[in-house]
Image (cartoon, coloured by chain):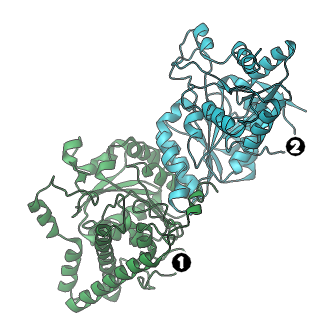
Amino acid sequence: MADSTVGAPSSAGAAPEKKPTSKTSGRDEKTFRTELLRQMLLIRRLEEKSAQMYGLRKIGGFCHLYIGQEAVAVGAVAALDLKDDYVLTAYRDHGHALACGMDPKAMMAELYGRQTGCSRGKGGSMHMFDVDKHMLGGNGIVGAHIPLATGVALKIKYKKENGVVLCFFGDGAIHQGSFHESLNLAKIWDLPIVYICENNQYGMGTDFRRVSSVADFSKMGVSYDIPGSQVDGMNVLKVHAAVKEAADGARKEHQPSFIEALTYRYKGHSMSDPATYRTKEELGEYKNQDPILILKAQMLKSKQLSNEEFDKIDVECKGISNEAAQFAEDSPQPAIETLYEDVLV
Amino acid sequence: MPVIAFRQALKDAMDEEMARDQNVILMGEEVAQYNGAYKVSQGLLDKYGPERVIDTPITEEGFTGVGIGAAMVGLRPIVEWMTLNFSAQAFDQVLNNAAKLRHMSGGQLNVPIVFRGPNGPAEYLSSQHSQSFQAFYSHIPGLKVVAPYTPHDAKGMLKSAIRDDNPVIFLENEMMYAWKGEVPEEEYLVALGKADIKRTGEEVTLISFSKPMQTVLEAAEVLEKEGYSAEVLDLRSLRPLDEEAVFASVVKTNRCVIIDNDWPMASFGSYLGWLISKNCFDSLDAPVELVAMEDVPMPYNHNLELAVQPSVEKIVTAAKRVMYV
């Protein structure tokens, strides 16, 4: 996937050897953008495959799809070096896990609840963990991972390391005390963390404007003297630039920052949600600003991509998704006695 | 052997482990500059500095979660809750994060952290500051829960808890901090999960842990004076529970009274009573008795608050009931 990770092999034919950079001009930029495009497409196709397999009852429980929001995880994680940096997110976590380099097979097998899943079938959709790649979940209680992420940043500071933590959460989490307590702690202790609110506009079925004292979440850091900004979360390059600046700042100055990424999910909150609380027109409007189409159009225009190349990447991503589903299907169920494992060390 | 206070034993344990392992840090309200609300961390800020002895704002969910996050990536934090009553603010972090991260990551993560502080009633503190949390925390798989009674065990078990790779809830009590006992000068550990027979006896087993042990030992004295031989078992550790030691004692005496200073319904004591009834059924000569708190919030008035809790008289009465005397 996009990032060099902790010595782990590349996953499932997914990753180029080269680490992307955001340096402009020439081949580097083309390579970098192609990689972002490929990652977003991979997430899109894997999520579509997940939805399909959910429909076939291969996958159960709460399954929150990331379709529409791909630019946020992909753009943000591309700004990291996961040798030193860390990612924590909430339960809509498939995209972040893939962006961190999780093997699509391990992800799909986890969705199927199989022994070969990243969490050995203990976690499911909401609990994607790849600790070697510094992807620390996949957390199911709204906002409760924000203090954890802050604690990871405390460790970086205590150990005098060079890393930064990206802590993703949704607009539904921002009114939890855990968010506000964490921002205060991060500021008084000068912790290297970037809080990223993915505002997809609906906390389950509730329009964020109905439940927030402010419509502009970037103001939320102000009480804690933490700089806040808004970024177009449908534009992967803009997300990348904003997060890169924030992450570099956190590394250099050990200062927290806050970014609100304005985004949209195409599907319901979870698989059981028909999303009748919003209009077709609204959904259509956002589909016109699809993060994949935006980058594709930009690259076509600047001749960094041809339609044929795009189709080839898309076919590859569909192939990886099909292989992942087949791998999950072929994987064994966990043995019953494993239920006693992974409780205590 | 030196005689030191319970708080000193806890401080010495933290001091030794902080000297031994740079990954051990202490965080909580008033732990640093104030030297601890109950002076348990006296002198640690001066010795280890503000990077390792960290004052937090009053933000229990926040700093508890921060401790857990730091533990996930290799630190070994000791989180002091000023009282377990305030840990209710942080309960979600313990229940859903500390106790679950290893599980939901399929064993990829460890959470080596100690949460410690005073638990259960002190005096004159009314209902919000006098609660017992052993039932809440020992209910949860993925945690260890310990509650030593002597300074010796407090030191040895806190050192073991800090070295443990699992989250450990370490229960203390305000009234116990000044209690004194012998503690060896040389380094030692007390394993978690091992009960201790405080007094051997033949006719009835009295089982308890933490502060009520003192009342239980007094009750055993009273029983002895009246001609009855009571065995007293200090559980020390609630999760893991030393079932072997419990069953061995009950099988020997055939009678059992559990003393748990907590509300009776769905309590640790009621669970233990079920466990003994199920496993020692053929040995029991009487139903297992439970001496618990009265099923009410704690009143402020001293006579009332004493009446709510287990007493020597209540324990002796229960012991006589199971002995049919």
Q: Is A301 located above or below residue B313 in the figure?
A: below
**Dots 1 and 2: beta carbons under 8 Å?**
no
Q: Nearer the viewer, residue A249 or A1?
A: A1
Residue B298 spot, x, y in % from top left: 54, 17
What residue type is disc 2 on? Glu
Query: Which chain gets the cyan colouring?
Result: B
Residue A147 spot, x, y in % from top left: 46, 49
Residue A145 spot, x, y in % from top left: 44, 52
- Marker disc for residue B186: 2
Quarter of the N terminus of chain B within the rendering: top right
Label 1 SS: loop
- The shade of chain A is green
Q: Nearer the viewer, residue A129 or A115?
A: A115
As drawn, is B276 to the left or to the right of A151?
Answer: right
Q: Quadrant of residue B235?
A: top right
* Residue found 34% across the figure and 77% down from its top: A39
Q: Chain of mark 2?
A: B
Q: Is residue B34 visible?
A: no
| Number of dots carrying numbers | 2
As drawn, is A78 to the left or to the right of A263?
Answer: right
Label 2 SS: loop
Q: For mark 1, does the 10 Å Cα neighbourhood hold few (<14), some (14 to 19), or many (20 or more) residues?
A: few
Q: For mark 2, does the 10 Å Cα neighbourhood hold few (<14), some (14 to 19), or many (20 or more) residues?
A: few
Q: Is B251 located above or below residue B51 in the figure?
A: above
- Looking at the rendered structure, whether the residues under marks 1 and 2 are on a common chain is answered as no
Q: Nearer the viewer, residue A242 or A172?
A: A172
What residue type is disc 1 on? Ala
| Residue that mark 1 sits on | A8
Q: Chain of mark 1?
A: A
Q: Residue furthest bottom?
A: A308
- Give the distance between the C-alpha atoms of the residues marked 1 and 2, in whole angstroms: 45 Å
